Every structure is written in structure tokens, then in C-alpha cells.
Image: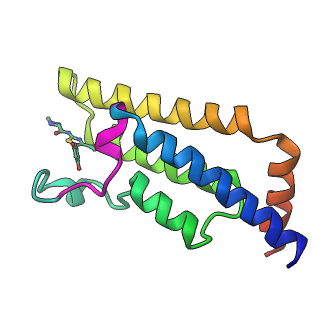
Amino acid sequence: ISQEENTLRELRIFLRDICAKLARNKQFFMFTKPVDIEEVPDYLEIIKEPMDLETVMSKIDKHCYICARDFLDDIDLIVRNALEYNPDKSAEDKHIRHRACSLRDKAYAFIKAEMDSDFEDTCRDIRDKR
Ligand SMILES: CC(=O)c1nc(NC(=O)[C@H]2CNCCN2)sc1-c1cc(O)cc(O)c1
């Protein structure tokens, strides 16, 4: 098995662990599953590219992420969607925006804490060669 495949397998194991930790956090329950259109019927009129942690987990298994940056781009998409769908000054919207910002900070902190930068550099080299 090539060294590249070894590196990407290690990346997937690492990203699954981080995604599971985020999805386990009760604070982020509204980000764990695709938005239920029954619950929020106008959602798809406002949000053109929905994303959630369950979808991120399945993308890991489908080898969609070649480096941590690609994974964080989908986390950022979850956050951006929540900020766009919840722009009001109301307490409810502020609460969801606060949770979205917390999700972003926790995801970046887990990556920084557990990934050494030359592992990410190696993944970037693999991505850029493809
Ligand atoms: C994830 C998200 O962005 C989201 N935003 C919501 N905002 C509102 O309901 C605001 C919008 N402004 C007017 C006052 N209501 S509900 C909601 C959501 C929560 C869940 O428990 C599951 C789910 O799939 C989606």
C-alpha cells in the first residue's frame, strides 16, 4: 500500500475522531443532522448548500477529504449557513450564531491541538498533486 494511502488513512482516522467529538457535544445538536425541512420549511430558499456533521462524517468515509483544510471548509460551511439563516437580533438567533461560532472555534482548536503541521503539509502536497 502506497505511503500516500497510509497518510490519507491516518488523516481519515484523525478526522473521524474530531467529527465524533464535535457531534457528541450537546451544544451542537442542531448541527449534527441535515436540517429537517418539516421543522424549518423556508430553509432551502435561504441556504443553497446545506451541511451538517453527519454528512461530514459520511464524506470522510467516502475519502472526500485529502487534508484537514478540506474538512474545515465544510465545518466553515455549517457555520456560515447558521449565521446566514439566523441574522436577527432576537435571543434565539443570537444563541444559534453563538453556538455556530463555538463549533468553528472547537473544530480549529482540535485540529491545531492534535495535528502536527508537517502532517498537514504532507496532505496538502498529496492534494495539490491530484
Ligand atoms: C441549524 C439552524 O441553523 C437552525 N436555525 C434555526 N433558526 C430559527 O429557528 C430562527 C430563525 N430566525 C427566526 C427565528 N427562528 S432553527 C435551526 C435548526 C434547529 C434544529 O434543532 C434542527 C435543525 O435542523 C435546524
Where is residue 34 shown, x and y percent of the image?
Answer: 30, 58
Query: At 22% from the left edge and 22% from the top edge, which residue is drawn?
Result: 89
Query: At 64% from the left edge and 63% from the top edge, which residue is drawn?
Result: 65
Q: Which residues are magenta?
A: 27-36
- Given residues 64 and 130, the one toward you in this image is 64
Q: Is residue 47 left or right of residue 90?
A: right
Name the quarter where the C terminus is drawn: bottom right
110 lies above or below 48:
above
Where is residue 81 shown, x and y percent of the image?
Answer: 36, 47
Q: Quadrant of ligand 1?
A: top left
Q: Is residue 109 left or right of residue 32?
A: right
- Given residues 123 and 130, the one toward you in this image is 123
- Given residues 75 and 10, the one toward you in this image is 10
Query: At 82% from the left edge and 67% from the top edge, which residue is drawn?
Result: 6
Query: At 87% from the left edge and 57% from the top edge, which residue is drawn?
Result: 122
The quarter of the picture where residue 125 lies is: bottom right
Q: Is residue 94 left or right of residue 28?
A: left
Q: How is the image coloured?
A: rainbow
All told, the count of numbered labels is 0
The quarter of the picture where residue 11 lies is: bottom right
Where is residue 28 shown, x and y percent of the image?
Answer: 36, 37
Where is residue 90 shown, x and y percent of the image?
Answer: 17, 23
81 lies above or below 108:
below
Name the quarter where the N terminus is drawn: bottom right
| 25 is within the stretch colored magenta | no
Q: Is residue 108 left or right of residue 46?
A: right
